[in-house]
Image (spheres, helix red, strand yellow):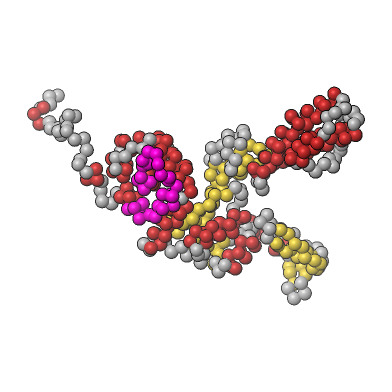
Amino acid sequence: MLIDSANIQFKEYSQGMDSLFPSRLDENISSDAPVRLVNRIVDELDISPLLSTYKGGGCPAYYPRMLLKVLFFAYLNNVYSCRKIARLLQENILYMWLSGKSTPDFRTINDFRSKRLKSCIHSLFTQIVLMLVDLGYISLEKQYIDGTKMESAANRYTFVWRKSVEKYKERLKKKIQCILSQIDEGILCDNHAPEESTLSIDSRALKEKIDAINLENRSKRELRQIKKLNEEYLPKLQEYEKHLETMDERNSYSKTDPDATFMRMKEDHMKNGQLKQGYNLQISTENQFITNFGIYQRPGDTLTRIDYLESFKARYGMQSLEIVADSGYGSEENYEYMWRNGILPYVKYNMFHVEQRRRYRNDPFRVTNLFYNDREDFYICPMGQRMRFIRLEKHYTENGYEQTTSIYR
């Protein structure tokens, strides 16, 4: 087959051109490009809290508003690596225009994000949401709330568990009690610790006790025991106390990410629900815009609701009129809070879906399936006998909320 080369035409190509880019970088950026929207939004933000993190002297710093634009646009495009952002500032015309051809390295970007922006991100987020309110996109009168588990990058083999720490701490205290009782009595001890420890002592009290021991006229056995207390048992007791202090009210934490907690993640494609280190992320939306967020260490959603709604009120100085959420948030405590604050809840109670099952509806021993006489206040049991009210019992949730239960016999 013969080809007539005279009819083939190619576009002009010359690597030796005088100018690689146009005189203005934005000539090749469309007027409705997302990068222009990011640029306009950041220009309208009040960044005075961010500017207050800078101190005078030293080398001139990159302008914070420019770095903020670059970060926001990178996040919009799912780019989170500082090294990738630094490379885009040298290769991508959108980033070059946004930064004014500034080329901060990845360390500068990371320091700005982790040290300066960290304390100001909440105020910047609030300003952007209020802009959306002024533009009429959202009203803040409704919240559609849901939570999701976010896995931590912590090493899964560095977790500390509360039950294990408490168990080993009690064993250690029994050994300490045994040694102290031997030293106080000045007798040799067998190797058996008391059945129950009568010692209520922490590391500080133990340190004071060791310092107060008179080392004169002590046998070699007692001196070895004192040395063991000081060099082995005391540091171990301090370590256990530090673990419990870090955990606070949690049941676990990771040494590589102390804020992460073991919690059950959503099932994978093999229907395997797994315990992994992570966080409980709560998000509010309205008209597909995120209006609030919160990160919690509690695995369940129920006990996060009140604190989360309070964070919304603290952020905007108001509370939404309507709340929409799933049954994971349904509890007496949450309903009472929402009604008391004038919120109309569209939230199923936590047993709603369970009660729809046939097994539950046909179970004659369920309280909801028993016949109740409202006028004389008694239930009829499956055997036909009356169960009458005998007392009220009070219970408290983890948040300290008081619940009252009626007991019938």
* x then y, percent, for residue 187: 91, 30
Residue 121: percent from left, percent from top: 46, 50
391 displayed left or right of 140: right
Residue 128 visible in the shown view: yes
* Residue at the farthest bottom position: 375
Residue at image location 25% in from the left, 48% down from the top: 30
Which corner quadrant holds the N terminus?
Answer: top left
Q: Is residue 300 above or below residue 223?
A: below
Which residue is found at the position 70% from the left and 62% from the top? 402
User: Is 282 left or right of 72, judged from the image as shown?
Assistant: right
Q: Residue at x 90, y 31 (%)?
A: 186
- Magenta residue span: 40-66
| Quadrant that contains the C terminus | bottom right
Total of numbered circles in the picture? 0
Residue 271 in picture, x, y percent from top left: 57, 41
From the viewer's side, name the closer residue of 110 and 52: 52
- The quadrant holding residue 387 is bottom right
Name the residue rendered at 63%, 60% in the picture.
331
Foreground of the two, 189 or 60: 60
Q: Is residue 51 shown in magenta?
A: yes
Going by the picture, which residue comes out furthest to the left? 6
| Residue 372: in magenta span | no
